[in-house]
């Protein structure tokens, strides 16, 4: 879990160049190949594949070497859904911002 959190931490909501997202995409693929999926529960597994799909489809979008805001939003949403699924379903952690 720590490794995939580190990888997805590189995804930010700020405009990132295509090369940075391509690096994340490669690292996500490597994590998957190393057996990382074996750790995931059903919901985390589904959200992982959604994140991977969004990262793969991102290759076809963008303006020059940057992504459009709508594509950044899709990547950001998929990233957060995946991380939330791991925290809530697999690790049983709950973080409340209203402490």
Image: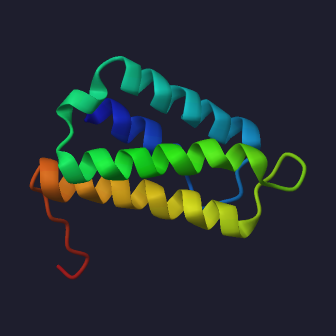
Q: Would you place residue 95 above or below residue 36 in this image?
A: below
Q: Picture quarter containing residue 73? A: bottom right
Q: Picture quarter containing residue 19? A: top right
Tally the marks.
0
For this orientation, the residue located farthest to the bottom is 98
Query: At x 48% / y 64%, what residue is drawn?
Result: 77
Q: Is residue 32 visible?
A: yes
For this orientation, the residue located farthest to the top is 34
Query: At x 34% / y 17%, what residue is drawn?
Result: 34
Image x and y of residue 78, in percent: 46, 58
Image x and y of residue 5, in percent: 35, 41
Query: At x 19% / y 66%, what residue is drawn?
Result: 95
Image x and y of residue 80, in percent: 40, 60
Using the image as rendered, state which of residue 79 and residue 5 is in the foreground: 79
Q: Is residue 93 left or right of residue 61?
A: left
Query: At x 57% / y 63%, what residue is drawn?
Result: 74
For this orientation, the residue located farthest to the left is 92
Q: Quadrant of the N terminus?
A: top left
Image x and y of residue 62, in percent: 80, 55
For this orientation, the residue located farthest to the right is 64
């Amino acid at each position: 879990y720590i490794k995939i959190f580190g990888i997805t931490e590189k995804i930010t909501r700020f405009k990132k160049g295509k090369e940075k997202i391509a690096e994340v995409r490669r690292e996500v693929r490597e994590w998957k190949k190393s057996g990382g999926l074996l750790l995931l529960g059903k919901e985390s597994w589904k959200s992982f594949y959604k994140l991977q799909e969004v990262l793969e489809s991102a290759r076809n979008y963008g303006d020059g070497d940057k992504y459009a805001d709508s594509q950044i939003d899709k990547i950001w949403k998929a990233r957060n859904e995946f991380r939330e699924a791991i925290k809530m379903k697999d690790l049983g952690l709950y973080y409340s911002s209203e402490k």
